[in-house]
Image (spheres, helix red, strand yellow):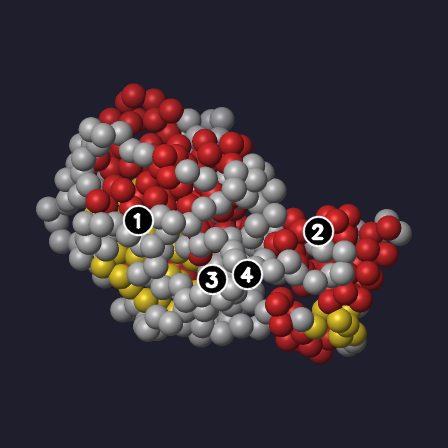
């Protein structure tokens, strides 16, 4: 993926907000119907005094309202649709001017003082060209919005997947530059997020203020257990429960950060920056494997999950799918083609990421606080992403862990 994909218009310049950083009044939030965004919305309403404008893709205003409400209900959240500080904006990240029309654009341009960009088209099997309109062009459009009218801060949610997988372990910190990372067009999601990251870095070089937040795997709510059912680790656990067995392989261990802990950390960090374009990696400092989850499942259900070597577990999964049994994991045809022995290809995040497309850090489990190390990016804009500092491409962080101020 060439860096030329991340070029901004030469005329684009940014004016830092005059107000103190951390005092947002009018927030534009993208991705509120997604897993992270759904939990971030109520946290923004609770943790700030700002009015939150949610960009929601729909055909009509009524459908936009219902789509947001349904997403929140799906994760066990009370939809704050009657909150006077919530404004639903019907639009589309992939559309010209966000699909809000000239009048809507003018209103956002003069009203918004903070952009929290959590939206993305997430599909790990899609090529770059299919994801570019929402993930790259949408970010570019939002940066144009940030540069026009009222001065705005720009907060970009990214992923540790912007760091390229490799055969050798390497340290990854907030100081690690990403300009040398390269992703093939076939790794569409990681490539699109890398380009988006670079766009924001270039904006910081031109005077934009805000931050980049690269997420590890974001997991279930620490109290309610609400989880993204389409997350790859969630699919793995579902398959294990259905099969009555689970694989024992250290390569399947994940760093799982609860979504509520992440949302609280993000809101704290929004008000904790100095406006210079800081970089934060947010991930759980520990790892956990499928066996720990299946042990709890067995205690609750009175079942017994057999522990198997990874190769044996893959064979059992293949046999189950050949018999017509539906499992939530990836198709075994992809598994056998990519890794006949059942071993993970060098540098892959897990067998699932290697066989179903790159999973660049979506979510995680646990009740401990997230690791967050911060970096103040200067004029160079050099920096480092869904799953900082621990990149699941077998990288390990040497950064200093800290909790964001509450």
Q: Secondary structure at mark 3?
A: loop
Label 1: few (<14), some or many (≥20) within 10 Å? many
Earlier-in-chain disc, 4 versus 3: 4
Judged left or right of residue 248, residue 120 is left
Instruction: Single out the mark in the foreground, 2 or 3.
Output: 2
Cα–Cα span, label 2 and label 4 = 16 Å
Of labels 2 and 1, earlier in sequence is 1
Tell me the distance, in whole angstroms, between the alpha carbons under discs 4 and 1.
32 Å
Name the one closer to the observer, 264 or 14.
14
Mark 4 vs mark 1, foreground winner is 4
Which of the labelled discs sits on residue 338, or is there none? 2
Cα gap from disc 3 to disc 1, whole angstroms? 21 Å
What label does residue 155 carry, if any? 1
Q: Residue 316, image x and y in percent?
A: 82, 62
Q: Nearer the viewer, mark 2 or mark 4?
A: 4
Q: Residue furthest right?
A: 323
């Amino acid at each position: 993926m060439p860096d030329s994909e991340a070029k901004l218009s030469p005329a684009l310049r940014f004016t830092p907000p005059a107000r103190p950083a951390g005092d947002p009044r009018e927030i534009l939030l993208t991705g509120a119907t997604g897993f992270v965004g759904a939990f971030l919305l109520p946290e923004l309403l609770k943790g700030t005094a700002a009015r939150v404008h949610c960009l929601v893709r729909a055909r009509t205003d009524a459908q936009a309202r219902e789509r947001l409400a349904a997403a929140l209900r799906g994760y066990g959240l009370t939809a704050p649709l009657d909150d006077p500080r919530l404004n639903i904006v019907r639009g589309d990240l992939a559309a010209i001017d966000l699909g809000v029309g000239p009048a809507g654009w003018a209103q956002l341009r003069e009203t918004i003082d903070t952009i929290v960009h959590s939206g993305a088209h997430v599909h790990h099997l899609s090529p770059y060209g299919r994801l570019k309109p929402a993930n790259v062009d949408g970010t570019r459009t939002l940066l144009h919005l940030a540069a026009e009218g009222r001065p705005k801060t720009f907060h970009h949610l990214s992923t540790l997947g912007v760091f390229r997988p490799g055969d050798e372990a390497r340290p990854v910190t907030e100081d690690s530059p990403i300009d040398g990372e390269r992703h093939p067009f076939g790794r569409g999601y990681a490539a699109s997020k890398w380009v988006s990251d670079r766009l924001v870095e270039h904006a910081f070089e031109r005077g934009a203020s805000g931050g980049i937040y690269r997420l590890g795997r974001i997991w279930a709510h620490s109290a309610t257990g609400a989880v993204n059912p389409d997350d790859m680790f969630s699919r793995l656990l579902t398959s294990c429960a259905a099969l009555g067995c689970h694989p024992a392989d250290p390569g399947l261990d994940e760093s799982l950060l609860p979504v509520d802990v992440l949302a609280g950390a993000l809101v704290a960090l929004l008000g904790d920056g100095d406006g210079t374009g800081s970089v934060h990696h947010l991930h759980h400092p520990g790892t956990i494997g499928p066996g720990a989850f299946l042990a709890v499942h067995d205690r609750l259900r009175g079942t017994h999950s057999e522990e198997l070597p990874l190769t044996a577990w893959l064979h059992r999964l293949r046999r189950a799918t050949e018999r017509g049994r539906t499992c939530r994991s990836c198709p075994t045809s992809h598994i056998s083609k990519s890794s006949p022995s059942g071993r993970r290809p060098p540098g892959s995040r897990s067998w699932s990421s290697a066989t179903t497309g790159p999973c660049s850090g979506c979510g995680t489990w646990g009740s401990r606080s997230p690791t967050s190390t911060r970096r103040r990016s200067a004029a160079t804009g050099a920096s480092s992403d869904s799953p900082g500092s621990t990149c699941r491409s077998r990288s390990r962080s040497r950064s200093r862990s800290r909790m964001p101020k509450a």
